[in-house]
Amino acid sequence: MNLFDTLEMKTPMLPDAYKEMSVMELEERVRGVKERMGSRLFLPGHHYQKDEVIQFADVRGDSLKLAQLSAENRDAESIVFCGVHFMAETADILTTNDQKVYLPDMRAGCSMADMADINQTEKAWDELMSLFGDTIMPLTYVNSTAAIKSFVGKNEGATVTSSNAEKMVSWAFSQKERILFLPDQHLGRNTAYNLGIPLEHMAVWDPILEKLNYEGNLEDVKVILWKGHCSVHENFTVHNIQQVREDYPDMNIIVHPECRREVVALSDDAGSTNHIIKTIEAAPSGSEWAIGTEMNLVNRIIQEHPDKHIISLNPSMCPCLTMNRIDLPHLAWCLESIEKGEPHNVIEVEKDVAVNAKKALDRMLERA
């Protein structure tokens, strides 16, 4: 039984009444709860959320920014996180015990985060210690479960974001000879390459086969990449870039560093979600852009910048399916349940896990 099957059994299902409501009625209900609860309620919304949901967000941002803003908002008793599971976990870790964090639909997960579970990681760590000794610093992308953050924190490592990955990888190399980068191999590879580490000094750990993929002398390994990826960003290809270059010779291509190395190498620019947004905002009117990131965000950027010619790098790209689990009916149901004192979908990270996960987050935040 997989994670989603388990959640289906444990999580209350959306009542039929919410499925039958019109968009107008659902929007009125959401607005009503927000007005009545006021500052006691806080709705952070991730950039990849649907427009029907993001319109009600009190703040928009990436996962870590939203978790930090949740922690800073001491007035909020209830934080309804419009994102995915690992983001709500991070918010719960950083907020106080008096604050409760909710996820409108518990099925809103992250395929990348699920590619590294704690059992696999502990087995890998033991094997890598036997190969390399105490020479490895573990780093995990914030797009990971609380258990993985906790593992990294316990082993003196830190979390990273796509914005500060280079800074954190440089810090890790000041502490140890090698790094283990979880769970996204592409962000790890692109970051290390930008810091001057040759591709031939990077190995890949396969958690399914429990095997280190590397040809050469193990002493040359500097970066161990976990074999994980973002199912959205991995679908941007070299062919997509070639097509844009052919169809729009003057178009700039900007992509997220979760894309494959060869895609990043052929693009004009690469950076975090925030970097992409700021770059387009600062671009001159009439400029042309192909963007390689999640479609909900790309479509929103297109709508907000009608003076620029903007397209998706992959015209066949679908929005992130797990992000799209959060919809207007689930949001309305979640908010009304909280207001009635009958909440569901509470995100609570176990204390011992949270303590070490916070160490990993704090080591990063201290260097922000």
Image: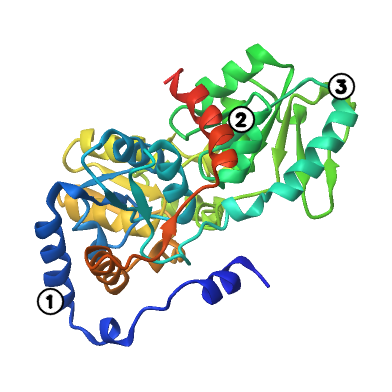
In the rendered image, residue 111, in percent from the top left (x then y), is placed at 57, 58
Going by the numbered disc 1, the residue's amino acid type is Met
Going by the numbered disc 3, the residue's amino acid type is Glu
The residue that disc 2 covers is 153
In the rendered image, residue 59, in percent from the top left (x then y), is placed at 23, 45
The answer to whether residue 31 is seen in the rendering is: yes
Q: How dense is the environment of label 1, judged by Cα within 10 Å: few (below 14), some, or many (20 and up)?
A: few
- Front-most of 11 and 232? 11
Answer above or below: position of 118 versus 149.
Answer: below
Q: CA distance from mark 3 to mark 2?
A: 26 Å
Residue at 46 percent of width and 27 percent of height: 164
| Label whose residue precedes the other's in the sequence (3 or 1) | 1
The answer to whether residue 255 is seen in the rendering is: no
Residue at 32 percent of width and 87 percent of height: 16
54 relative position to 160: left or right: left
- Front-most of 264 and 179? 179
Colour setup of the view? rainbow
Q: CA distance from mark 3 to mark 1?
A: 63 Å
Residue at 11 percent of width and 71 percent of height: 28
For label 3, the SS is helix
The residue that disc 3 covers is 219
316 relative position to 205: left or right: left
Query: Quarter-wise, where is residue 346 in the image?
Result: bottom left
The residue that disc 1 covers is 24
